[in-house]
Image (cartoon, rainbow, N blue to C red):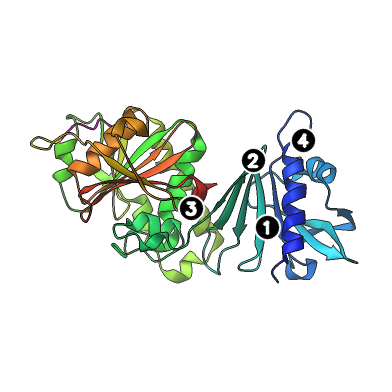
Amino acid sequence: MLPDVATIEAMIDVAFWASLRREEGYVPAISLAYIAPEQAPVALRLERPLPLAPQWLTRLSPAVERPGVHLGVWRDNGELMVWGATRKLPPFSFVLEVIAPGLLVVKHSPVEGSGKFMNVAVFEGEQIKIIDQNAQALADCPGVLFSLLGLEANGNPEAGAGEGVWIRIAASMRRHGRGGSLLVVPSGSQEWRDSILHPVTYALDPSFTGLTDLLHKDPAERQLGRWQEALTRAIDAVAGLTAVDGAMILTDRVELLAFGAKIVRRRGFAQVNRIVVSEPVQGVQPVEVEPSAMGGTRHLSAAQFTHDQRDAIALIASQDRRFTVFAWSPCDETVLAHRIDALLM
């Protein structure tokens, strides 16, 4: 059951004020789910539900700050109450997550068999970003952006987009906080080498196919909890390599080729001189900027790589945890930069 407008407003208001409080010096990390107790058969239930109020959320936050734990909220005699905590949610449940002081994200729980919660809106202070579900209409929207929006990828069906692997790698890159570069190149092609400084210190031979092997497991085996755990560990291990200075290189089949690679301009190609920046947020229009406006060396080199390697994409995490996907647009004859922070929180 979806909450009405008054319930959504009340939950956002309480969560916002809770985000500004501290519990023994720590910023509260809380996820609220609007769900009736009987909808969560496996849950921790309080004998006496607590009022939905900032002070109670702050006090409970140390117990539920682990990823995947949600405080259950439901109306009892007309009042919103916290009845307990659960890890299991019905599909499309309303979820409100406190990320940082004044930063909240509205999500819905995934459909059966999918592990990705889909972001609906981001509240950052007085700024509200509503995710534009029509962003896939962009003519040159790369397959990874389709995956991040929870849509079917328009590229290689074996690339793992159906398992949300790209968004999970992106989220893991963003989480380690060191910044990082990921280049996704066509499987079987060697052209990417023309844009990389050689020798590559951390080149792999043979390529690492641990993620690919997991994604090709029998569908029945994928339903087992240990498969999901193995996939999560593999994603975090691979994404962790982006913390090494330089770029990590994966194929579109998620085969790991190298990490710590240095990007150079491809011989015979001009220097990139313009970029079109977009964001999958309602009301935000694409704008053309000079490459220097995108950020530091990491962003400039990613823009140059996708300018020179036009069948590749680049995913860039900043140290401030902003995230950008670079891809070449054959229609506009320019590099597109999709800012997708709002999708990864």
Nearer to us of marks 2 and 1 is: 2
Quadrant including the N terminus:
bottom right
Q: Does the magenta stretch include residue 261?
A: yes
Circle 2 sits in a helix, a strand or a loop, which is it? Answer: loop
The residue carrying pointer 3 sits among few (fewer than 14), some (14 to 19) or many (20 or more) residues within 10 Å by Cα, namely many
Local crowd size for mark 4, using a 10 Å CA cut-off: few (<14), some (14–19), many (≥20) = some
> Is 93 above or below relative to 240?
below
Distance from disc 3 to disc 4, alpha carbons, whole Å, reads 29 Å
Name the residue beneath numbered marker 4. Answer: 21
Nearer-the-camera pick, 255 or 99: 99
Dot placed on the residue nearer the N-terminal end, 2 or 1:
1
N-terminal-most mark, 3 or 2: 2
Magenta-colored stretch includes residue 192: no
Mark 3 residue element: loop
Q: Are marks 3 and 4 in contact (CB under 8 Å)?
A: no
Q: What residue type is labelled 1?
A: Arg
- Residue 331, quarter of picture: bottom left
CA gap between label 4 and label 2 equals: 15 Å
Query: What is the CA distance from the residue labelled 1 to the residue labelled 4?
Result: 25 Å
